[in-house]
């Protein structure tokens, strides 16, 4: 060993070489381009194809967008402005139609002097939603409620809302902001009351109607407490039957009598004045709020051990899922008069809401059933082992986990339902997409305008639906309890 | 001991119907049954009273009356003097045509977009994301109206194709003309027409069509037999014979022979006067509906395909490579069977959705079953109850057939747990 090393000159480097720059091809933009766009012949071809597609889209639509006109009274005026500014033969978008018909797109034919009512209802919706949607983050709640407060009050002032209602809205919104800091769960009371309040604000009329509806559950609770001393089961039956009896037999008369004693009325607005996004959002929000509980009940029924309950649930779900929504909407508009006692007429929007709810509840039930099936058997067995009865096991162990698993499906059902609200155009309601655009085109000044209304409505729908899907991703992240 | 038996089988008391878990579900079901029956009875008795009050009855006799309206596009011969029943059948066939074409095209679009969205090419992946999000988050009705408006507003009228300096040109090697009234596509002509099989009721099938179907189905079975034979040889000898050329020959040669025998040729549409003749003039309603349904459902299928591919862990393909399988066989033997298991159930519901969404045909005036039975027939006869119930029944049967068929397929590809 030593002999071989005897001749070698020892060399030890005592200074480090400065690190060399990576080769140009392996650094910065070039590297990114090579990896992501030109990593092989196929990839290069695809990139060229993609560039061609982008170029095609840009070259066809860019000048149209760039030549947008926002201020004009008619399509002819729009075209004149475009021709004057960019020369003969130039194409351009005429967004002036959106500007001029904005109110119609948002409120339909709602009376102009009452625009503040839907606006306030929409603003208060966020108060009702805040404790449900953002129950864990006070910061997000603060931001959402803050923005809702400022915007709602500002819009109400702009729309000339009466001072009394302005004070009411301000009290609710600012009160909600304060309460959500300390006791966010208390806001749930408002969430429960909101549907009735919303109906009253939108349709107007006497406040005694919704109030008498509210008396039903109160009576039910009273009956439950009173009968509860005798027998638990009888109490449940009484709690269900008493409100039903109240609503069907007494509530209407009671509301009329109360109204004649003390009048609590605001101007009524008929359903045919509703339209545009007001209609879409009304149908969408009510459908969403009602289809989730109904879907849960249907899913539990379908997984029930009771043969009859299960069969009925399967029949209902498969029937609804087997027919198109349009057919159900036609049932609502044409056939419901046959199925109800002679002389019964009730509101077309309400009928549509019921049908949309039933429709999405069937889909919801399947989504939730998937979540229930995905839950490991051990969870059910553990609940049984703890001695929980059926409802407690469902409420405390099974449903929270199953619903968490099915969030993406639930939200895509919501999105699908909101998109489907446009189909109400076929039963004669003024949805923003088809009926409203047709109505705009029917006027002489906007005859022949196609793309701008469609693009505008599509963009709003995209914003809302995309927002919902992003929210579902946020919710999934927030509720993730495993794989940490 | 006696105590135990006594408590295990106590004498029956009425209170146990409520408090004993064994009987409680029975009680509950009986109550539910009574309530549901009462509801049904209420609905039916209301209907009977309402029909009485209106002086109407409930019968389907109107189906055999003269329809008296025209349908622009009829897969089977139909004139306005035919019955409402025949009009409904024409509508049903139109529904089936757009649904089947839509399902096929949407599957192709969806697979391409889904795979492309997973591509390592940055630009293509982004483009596909934009496509998927744009189509999934906007109502289908909007896409149908926009595509239809593109056809009616932007496409040139047929006479723009006329003359030496025509302002519009045909596409796809002068075979297809997109006009604002219809889309003219080529038709097939036969030199040796073998005649038609008459099924009665003016429904005919050309023998050539039947021959092609038989040859294709037969070829598919022979191909499967070749595959089985190759498998047997592989099991016995260890080496798999090359079969791709046999399969290709079996699938294509008979068809080519038939094309030669019948003298099949493509006849492109030509402009005569103000209209295209010679080819088939497809209503723009059908084309717009088909395109919109394809693109819309394709976006959903793309997400399903993407999820299916992502659901297969990398370990699976690595294990297949470790076993020495080549990439093609890794895909067909390892990845695809597992991905299909994830993909097929949601794919079925997309096919169902597409079929049901085809009822939006009323937005573009395409006469599907909603347009005939649930539209013009309903308005002419005033039989809302019968027409809508019948239409819902038809859709229900269609859905059950699709989901039944696809469930059979699903049962074949799903994981066999032993």
Image: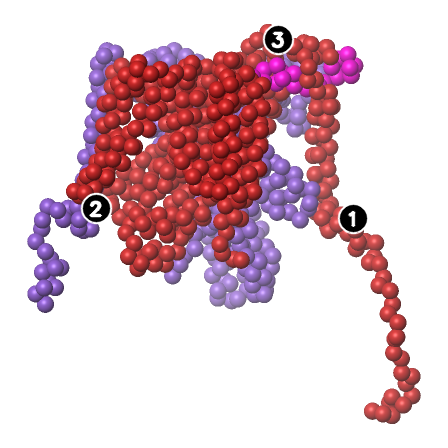
Chain assigned purple = B
Residue drawn at x 58%, y 61% as measured from the top left:
B318
Position of residue A146 relative to residue B166, above or below, is: below
Q: Earlier in the sequence, mark 3 or mark 1?
A: 1
- The 10 Å Cα crowd at callout 1, few under 14, some 14 to 19, many 20 or more, is few
Position of residue A387 relative to residue A161, above or below, is: below
Asked whether A343 or A120 is in front, the reply is A120
Colour representing chain A: red
Residue drawn at x 37%, y 13% as measured from the top left:
B379
Span shown in magenta: A82-103
* Secondary structure found at label 1: helix
Residue B38 location in percent, x, y? 20, 30
Tell me the subunit letter for badge 3: A
Q: Mark 2 sits on what residue? A: B25
Q: Mark 3 sits on what residue? A: A445
Q: Mark 1 sits on what residue? A: A29
Label pair 3/1, CB-CB below 8 angstroms: no
Tell me the subunit letter for badge 2: B
Asked whether A184 or A70 is in front, the reply is A184
Query: Gap in Å between the C-alphas at discs 2 and 1?
Result: 69 Å
Query: Gap in Å between the C-alphas at discs 3 and 2?
Result: 67 Å
Asked whether B212 or A438 is in front, the reply is A438
């Amino acid at each position: 060993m030593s002999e071989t090393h005897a001749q070698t000159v020892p060399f030890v480097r005592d200074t480090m070489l400065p690190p060399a720059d990576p080769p140009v091809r392996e650094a910065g933009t070039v590297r990114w381009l090579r990896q992501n766009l030109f990593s092989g012949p196929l990839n290069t071809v695809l990139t060229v194809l993609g560039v061609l597609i982008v170029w095609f889209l840009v070259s066809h639509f860019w000048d149209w967008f760039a030549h947008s006109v926002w201020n004009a009274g008619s399509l002819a005026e729009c075209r004149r402005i475009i021709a004057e500014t960019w020369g003969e033969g130039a194409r351009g978008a005429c967004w002036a139609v959106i500007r001029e018909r904005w109110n119609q797109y948002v409120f339909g034919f709602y009376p102009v002097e009452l625009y503040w009512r839907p606006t306030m209802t929409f603003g208060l919706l966020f108060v009702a939603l805040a404790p449900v949607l953002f129950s864990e983050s006070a910061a997000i709640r603060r931001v959402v409620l803050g923005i809702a407060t400022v915007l709602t009050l500002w819009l109400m002032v702009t729309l000339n809302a009466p001072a009394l209602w302005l004070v009411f809205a301000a009290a609710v919104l600012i009160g909600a902001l304060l309460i959500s800091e300390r006791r966010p769960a208390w806001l749930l009371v408002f969430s429960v009351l909101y549907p009735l309040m919303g109906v009253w604000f939108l349709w107007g009329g006497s406040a005694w109607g919704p109030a008498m509806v509210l008396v039903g559950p109160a009576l039910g609770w009273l009956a439950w407490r009173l009968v509860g001393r005798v027998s638990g089961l009888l109490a449940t039956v009484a709690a269900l039957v008493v409100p039903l009896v109240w609503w069907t037999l007494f509530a209407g008369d009671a509301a009329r009598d109360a109204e004649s004693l003390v009048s609590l009325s605001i101007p009524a607005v008929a359903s045919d004045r509703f339209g545009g996004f007001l209609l879409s959002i009304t149908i969408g929000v009510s459908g969403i709020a009602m289809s989730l509980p109904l879907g849960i009940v249907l899913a539990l029924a379908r997984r029930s051990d009771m043969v009859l309950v299960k069969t009925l649930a399967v029949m209902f779900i498969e029937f609804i899922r087997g027919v198109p929504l349009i057919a159900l909407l036609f049932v609502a508009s044409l056939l419901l008069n046959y199925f109800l006692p002679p002389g019964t007429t009730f509101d077309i929007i309400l009928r549509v809401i019921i049908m949309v709810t039933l429709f999405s509840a069937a889909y919801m039930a399947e989504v939730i059933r998937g979540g229930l099936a995905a839950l490991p058997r051990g969870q059910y067995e553990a609940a049984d082992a703890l001695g929980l009865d059926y409802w407690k096991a469902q409420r405390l162990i099974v449903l929270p986990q199953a619903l968490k698993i099915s969030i993406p499906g639930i939200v895509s059902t919501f999105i699908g339902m909101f998109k489907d609200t446009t189909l109400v155009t076929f039963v004669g309601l003024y949805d923003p997409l088809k009926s409203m655009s047709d109505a705009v085109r029917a006027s002489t000044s906007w005859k022949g305008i196609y793309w701008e209304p469609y693009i505008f409505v599509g963009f709003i729908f995209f914003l809302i639906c995309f927002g919902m899907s992003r929210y579902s991703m946020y919710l999934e992240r927030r509720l993730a309890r495993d794989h940490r | 001991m006696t105590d135990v038996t006594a408590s295990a089988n106590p004498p029956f008391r009425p209170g146990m119907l409520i408090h004993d878990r064994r009987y409680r579900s029975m009680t509950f079901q009986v109550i539910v049954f009574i309530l549901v029956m009462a509801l049904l009875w209420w609905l039916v008795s209301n209907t009977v009273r309402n029909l009485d009050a209106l002086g109407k009855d409930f019968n389907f006799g109107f189906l055999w009356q003269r329809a008296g309206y025209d349908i622009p596009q009829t897969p089977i011969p139909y004139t306005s003097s035919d019955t409402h029943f025949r009009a409904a059948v024409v509508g049903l066939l139109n529904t089936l045509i757009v649904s089947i074409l839509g399902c096929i095209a949407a599957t192709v679009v969806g697979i391409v977009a889904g795979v492309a969205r997973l591509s390592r090419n940055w630009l293509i992946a982004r483009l596909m994301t934009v496509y998927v999000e744009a189509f999934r988050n906007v109502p289908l009705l909007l896409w149908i109206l926009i595509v239809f408006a593109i056809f009616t507003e932007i496409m040139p009228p047929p006479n723009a194709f006329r003359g030496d300096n025509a302002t519009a040109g045909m596409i796809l090697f002068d075979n297809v003309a997109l006009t604002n009234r219809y889309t003219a596509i080529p038709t097939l002509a036969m030199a040796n027409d073998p005649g038609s099989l008459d099924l009665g009721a003016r429904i005919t099938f050309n023998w050539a069509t039947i021959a092609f179907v038989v040859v294709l189905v037969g070829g598919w079975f022979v191909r499967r037999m070749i595959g089985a034979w190759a498998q047997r040889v592989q099991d016995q000898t260890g080496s798999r014979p090359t079969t791709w050329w046999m399969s290709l020959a079996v699938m294509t040669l008979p068809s080519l022979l038939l094309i030669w025998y019948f003298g099949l040729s493509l006849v492109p549409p030509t402009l005569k006067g103000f209209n295209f003749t010679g080819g088939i003039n497809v209503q723009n309603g059908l084309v717009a509906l088909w395109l919109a349904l394809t693109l819309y459902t394709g976006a959903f299928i793309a997400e399903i395909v993407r999820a299916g591919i992502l659901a297969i862990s990398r370990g699976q393909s690595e294990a297949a490579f470790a076993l020495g399988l080549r990439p093609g066989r890794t895909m067909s033997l390892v990845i695809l069977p597992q991905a299909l298991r994830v993909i097929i159930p949601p794919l079925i519901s997309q096919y169902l959705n597409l079929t049901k969404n085809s009822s939006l045909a009323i937005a573009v005036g395409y006469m599907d079953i909603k347009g005939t039975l649930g539209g013009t027939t309903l308005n002419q006869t005033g039989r809302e109850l019968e027409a809508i119930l019948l239409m819902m029944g038809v859709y229900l049967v269609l859905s059950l057939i699709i989901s039944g068929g696809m469930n059979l397929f699903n049962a074949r590809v799903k994981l066999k747990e032993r």
